[in-house]
Amino acid sequence: MTFDIIIIGSGLAGYTLVKDFRRLNKTASILMLSTDDASYYSKPMLSTGFAKHKSAADLAMQPATQMAETLDITIYASTQVVSIDKAAKTIMIEGSQQSIGYNQSLVFATGAEPARIPLPDALSGRCFTINDLADYGQFREHLGEHKNVTIIGSGLVGTEYANDMCESGLNINVISLEDAPLQLLLPKPLSVNVQEQLANKGINFHFNTSIKDAALAEDGQLQLELTNGTSINCDLVLSATGLRPRIKLAQESGITVERGIVVNETLKSSDDNIYSLGDCAQINGLILMYVAPLAACSKALAKTLNGELTAVAIPASPVIVKTPACPVVSNPPPANAVGQWQFEGEAPDLKACFVAQDGSLLGFGLTGKKVMERMKLAKRLPAIL
């Protein structure tokens, strides 16, 4: 069995690429492989589902069968790729002795997986991550009528879920090794502003600390002991300690990997017939885990797969953080950028601009009503690629 193109992964990256490619090419045969049920949904909507009282089924836009028919592709759901033979241009899937070939290209759209941290044994079965639709459904099922959730991590994912769950009526504690939320996205004064606005909604933050121990109380609640001496009672724990690109299969197949699957400006890997995009890809040293860069990458790769070699061009892509209690837009300056932060406004409406010595704008952060300046400032920023 052979297809023109094989795509490993059915998340937003995989489906976006197929849609863009089908606008250019209606006839090439495409196989998509997914480790889950391959339902089509928007991952960013997961962190808005609690306040809207949405189930996993509510968030699923279309099942795999309908997507396969609409896009005229073959989808193998609940399927694990176990090996890739680059020379023969074939893959092997779990439970089958028959290889599947690709005439033209193989694309890794395998996304990222939650970073794991050591936790006390008492949290086994009570600590969850939410990285896909199945995770979301599992968490909601275990949550049931419980009301007390502790979130580990105050980055983008942890902060978004804290806001969303609080809006749904849950009692939220956030535990963080940092001293303010969103520290990778915002300078300290804006981070503190976000904390204050979320605290006003009832979210309890515990900074510069971690879980030291945990025990199950007689009433069934978890008792968490933190390294700073604080104790917290909760029903479930949500771990949001970051994401790591899924690179194991690529690495085992002899594809060059570093933090992600290494690709050039045309998204080609170290193998001439294998490409990567989305959260698993490392493009010219960058891992870009946001929707706007993905859209640009998908359009470029669709052209390349259709025979028109196209380098990806990614303009400045500010990150919109889904925290209605304190709207946030961020475009951090590049790593090792030389310059200084300039601040204006009054909480909760703050603006911070990272300005180089020559006066050029290299990054910004906005909160509250200042987010309205997002587009104006983005036009002044250098392109990502």
Image: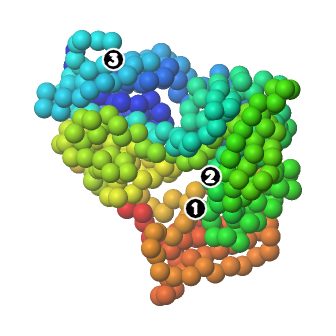
In the image shown, does 291 or 92 lie closer to the viewer? 92
In the image shown, does 299 or 248 lie closer to the viewer? 248
Judging by the rendered image, the residue that carries numbered circle 2 is: 156
Which label number is shown at residue 94? Answer: 3
Task: Report the Cα–Cα distance between label 1 and label 3.
Answer: 39 Å
318 left or right of 338?
Answer: right
| Mark closest to the chain's N terminus, 2 or 1 | 2
SS for callout 2: helix
On the image, which quarter does residue 97 sit in? top left
Q: Amino acid at mark 2?
A: Leu
Q: Amino acid at mark 3?
A: Glu
Which label number is shown at residue 55? Answer: none
Circles 2, 1 touching at the beta carbon (< 8 Å): yes
Q: Is residue 22 visible?
A: no
Which label number is shown at residue 184? Answer: 1
Mark 2 residue crowding within 10 angstroms, few (<14) / some (14–19) / many (20+): many
SS for callout 3: loop
Q: Is residue 348 visible?
A: yes
Compared to 65, does 27 lie above or below? Answer: below
Measured from the top left, where is residue 155 in percent x and y?
62, 53
Measured from the top left, where is residue 286 in percent x and y?
39, 57
